[in-house]
Image (spheres, rainbow, N blue to C red):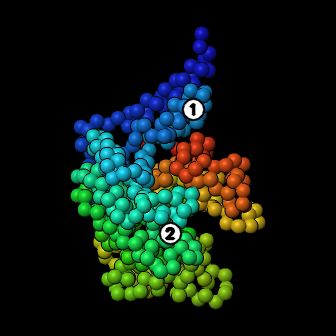
Amino acid sequence: MEPRTSRRRTATFAAALTAFAALTSLTATQAQAQATPAQGTITPATRFYVDPHSKAAKQALADFRNGDVEDAVNMAKLASWPQAEWFTEGTPDEVRAKVGKLVQRARAVGRTPVLVAYNVPGRDCTQYSSGGAASSAAYRQWIDAFAAGIGTAKAAVVVEPDGTALLPKDCGPGVDPTGELTAARIADLAYAVRTLKARPRTAVYLDAGNVQWRPVGEMARRLLDAGVRYSDGFALNVSNTHPTDHNARYGTWIAKCMWFATEARGNAESCAGQYYSSAAPNDGLPGNAVSSTDPATWRWTDAWFDQHVGTPPAGDLRHFVIDTSRNGLGAWTPEPGKYTGDPEIWCNAPGRGLGPRPTADTGVPLVDAYLWIKIPGESDGSCTRNTGGTVDPEYGIVDPPAGTWWPDQAHSLARNAAPPLTFRR
């Protein structure tokens, strides 16, 4: 006879799988009865595609077979929420086929898939996620095929995480002494944006780093140079843990700064930001200068925009999306003095949790959606915290390579989710 506790665990997990299956098996008829987003844009009515065969769904089954019902249920909950699909390599024919297959699955249930194009030449400065197309010509052929795969289907595309925030000129002394590589990167990004946005039902967001990276004015200029005007806007916090509300303020400043630089004929580099504002006294007294780690001081940045930008017409400002896949508990800060070098706070940050659930109904001006762009549970790379070894001292192991599914991390993100993880309704 099967033990009662085993039967109870089986019943619990079966109920979880039933709930998950019900959420991911909408028929096309049911989906068509719901509101349909406008052509080529994300609206509060947009519903994003959930892959019923995601890594989290497979992990749920593996956990249950191992007798770990609590983690299995958490993974089933995680799998019920939409996540992005990353395209990082392959020939043009291969990417066309893979993108086409995804968008057709989403179309069959009336959902909008979220795709990430991540193949620009020289990506990630040869770091953990290095790679990319062999040349600009090869990249543009790849992007053409990516767009062809989407065709006339609905899609939301995030273009090249870190692509604008980490230009070749930022990779270190001697990497791009003539600026030729950086100019090529900017041109490639602009080509990708225009080509993808030419699809009739595709929303396009060019990546723009995060609130603790490039200053507002610098990022605004980079986005403008890289063709953001041809897109729906930009993406923030991809693969990072900074709080949602911090990124929302940062994104709003960038949108206003771009308006200031184009419509008001101002200089983007003069915009106040998360590091400095000329509207602040800057006299050395506490709270009288802008600090990127103290949002209470950001009132001085708001004051600069009130003085110099005012309230631009809402329709003139670019919108943005925010990655909330692991920022529920905010950014990780190691113990003071623990590391003498860069602790890589962005890299497999320990003890983090899933953040706000993916939705296009954010209720926040200019924020088109909260998305899980970075797949929860995938490693950032074999982080070492610049200790010179191969082991990540935060975990006591060699972290899996970038993009590799890491069950322990997935379980931790689910357990620490803020708000607590539930099944999608």
Give the mark nearer the N terminus: 2 vs 1. 1
Q: Amino acid at mark 1?
A: Asp
Q: Where residue 48 sits in the image (x, y, percent)? A: 36, 48
Q: Position of residue 27 (x, y in %)?
A: 28, 36
Quadrant in the rendering for residue 405: top right
The local secondary structure at tag 1 comes to helix
* Whole-number angstrom distance, CA of label 2 to CA of label 1: 38 Å
Quadrant position of residue 306? bottom left
- Pointer 1: what residue? 63
Quarter occupied by the N terminus? top right
Quadrant for the C terminus in the image: top left
User: Which percent across, then down, holds residue 221?
Assistant: 42, 78
Q: Is residue 141 visible?
A: yes
33 or 57, which lies in front? 57
Residue at mark 2: 166
Residue drawn 63% across and 80% down?
Answer: 287
Q: Residue at x 59, y 89 (%)?
A: 281
Residue at image location 49% in from the left, 26% down from the top: 14
| Amino acid type, label 2 | Leu
